[in-house]
Image: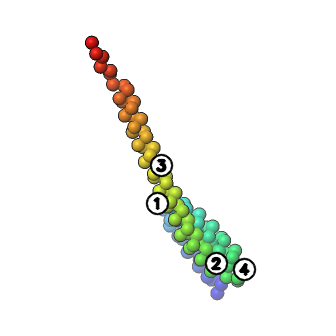
Amino acid sequence: MNRKYSIAVTALSLTALIGGCAGGPMTTREKGAGIGAVGGAAAGGLIGSAFGRPGMGAAIGGGTGLVGGALIGDYMQGREQEQYEYNQQTIQQNQRTIDRNQRPQRTEY
């Protein structure tokens, strides 16, 4: 029974992995979720094998890692967005300064 469970979990994981790669480039949130899920499943499998339940440990660890990784990835994605917006504002301010400095100066006679 344990072998059938492990094969089912592996098949489901591969299906989810392949299906998740169908859209364009991955966001930071998705990368974090993927890294967390893989790391959590590996750690959970190792811990679960100590108790004779590696499949259950991998499933629990994978789910926990998925949630944790997604939360961390979401935070990082938010920080990236803030940095992008800050950079855009800086670029616009610099462009306004350049435009202002390139205007012909009025001379007083």
- Of badges 1 and 3, the one in the foreground is 3
The residue sitting at the front extreme is 108
Between discs 3 and 2, the one toward the N terminus: 2
Real-space Cα separation, disc 4 to disc 2, in angstroms: 9 Å
Asked if disc 4 and disc 2 are in contact, CB closer than 8 Å, the reply is no
Question: Which quarter of the image is occupied by the N terminus?
Answer: bottom right
For label 1, the crowd category at 10 Å Cα-Cα, with few meaning under 14, some 14 to 19 and many 20 or more, is: few
Between discs 1 and 2, the one toward the N terminus: 1
Q: In this orientation, which residue lies closer to the viewer: 10 or 26? A: 26
- Of badges 3 and 2, the one in the foreground is 3
Real-space Cα separation, disc 3 to disc 2, in angstroms: 38 Å
At 47% from the left edge and 56% from the top edge, which residue is drawn?
Answer: 78
Picture coordinates of residue 22 (x, y %)? 48, 62
- Of badges 1 and 2, the one in the foreground is 2
Question: What residue would you read off at disc 3?
Answer: 83
At 39% from the left edge and 39% from the top edge, which residue is drawn?
Answer: 92
At 44% from the left edge and 46% from the top edge, which residue is drawn?
Answer: 86
Rendered image quadrant of residue 93: top left
Question: What residue would you read off at disc 4?
Answer: 50
Question: What residue would you read off at disc 1?
Answer: 23
At 69% from the left edge and 76% from the top edge, which residue is drawn?
Answer: 47
Picture coordinates of residue 13 (x, y %)? 57, 72
For label 2, the crowd category at 10 Å Cα-Cα, with few meaning under 14, some 14 to 19 and many 20 or more, is: many
- Could one spot residue 50 in this view of the protein? yes
Real-space Cα separation, disc 4 to disc 3, in angstroms: 44 Å
The residue sitting at the left extreme is 109
Question: What residue would you read off at disc 2?
Answer: 57
Between discs 4 and 3, the one toward the N terminus: 4
